[in-house]
Image (spheres, rainbow, N blue to C red):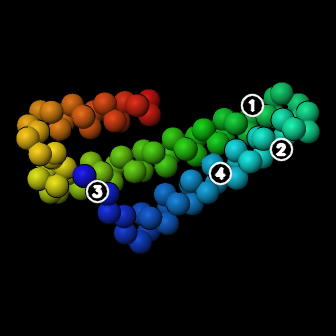
C-alpha cells in the first residue's frame, strides 16, 4: 500500500521527523561534550516522542486510507483477515 499524504498531513509528519532529527543531533552533540546524563536522557526522550508521534500519524493515515479504500491496502492474494493482522502488527511495532 502506498501512503498518499496531502497538504497539512505531509507538513505535520515532516515537521515531526525534522524535529526528531534535530533532537537526535542535539543528543549526539551533548554526549560528545560530556553533558549531564539527565539532560541527555531528557533530550533523547523528546526525540523518541517526536518519532513515535510521526509514526502514529503515518499509521493513522494508512489506516484511514485502508478504511476508505480497502482494496488499496490489500496485497495480492491477501485476505481481509491477513491485512488486518499485518496492520495490527505494524501499529503494535510502535507501542
Q: Position of residue 34 (x, y in %)?
A: 91, 33
The nearer-to-camera label among 1 and 4 is 4
Q: Residue at x 24, y 56 (%)?
A: 65
Q: Position of residue 26 (x, y in %)?
A: 77, 46
Residue 76: name its quadrant.
Answer: top left
Q: Which residue is under mark 4?
A: 21
Q: Residue at x 15, y 46 (%)?
A: 74
Q: Is residue 86 left or right of residue 32?
A: left
Q: Is residue 93 above or below residue 61?
A: above
Q: Is residue 64 visible?
A: no
Distance from disc 3 to disc 1, alpha carbons, whole Å, reads 35 Å
Q: Is residue 46 above or below residue 68?
A: above
Q: Which residue is under mark 1?
A: 41
Q: Residue at x 83, y 27 (%)?
A: 37
Q: Are marks 1 and 4 in contact (CB under 8 Å)?
A: no
Q: Which residue is under mark 3?
A: 2
SS assignment at label 2: helix
Distance from disc 2 to disc 1, alpha carbons, whole Å, reads 13 Å
- Say which label, 3 or 4, has the lower sequence index: 3
SS assignment at label 3: loop
Amino acid at each position: 500500500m502506498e501512503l498518499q499524504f496531502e497538504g497539512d498531513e505531509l507538513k505535520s509528519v515532516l515537521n515531526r521527523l525534522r524535529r526528531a532529527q534535530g533532537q537526535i543531533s542535539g543528543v549526539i552533540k551533548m554526549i560528545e561534550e560530556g553533558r549531564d546524563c539527565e539532560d541527555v536522557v531528557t533530550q533523547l526522550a523528546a526525540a523518541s516522542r517526536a518519532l513515535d508521534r510521526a509514526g502514529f500519524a503515518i499509521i493513522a493515515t494508512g489506516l484511514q486510507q485502508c478504511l476508505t479504500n480497502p482494496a488499496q491496502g490489500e496485497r495480492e492474494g491477501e485476505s481481509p483477515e491477513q491485512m488486518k493482522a499485518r496492520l495490527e502488527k505494524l501499529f503494535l511495532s510502535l507501542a
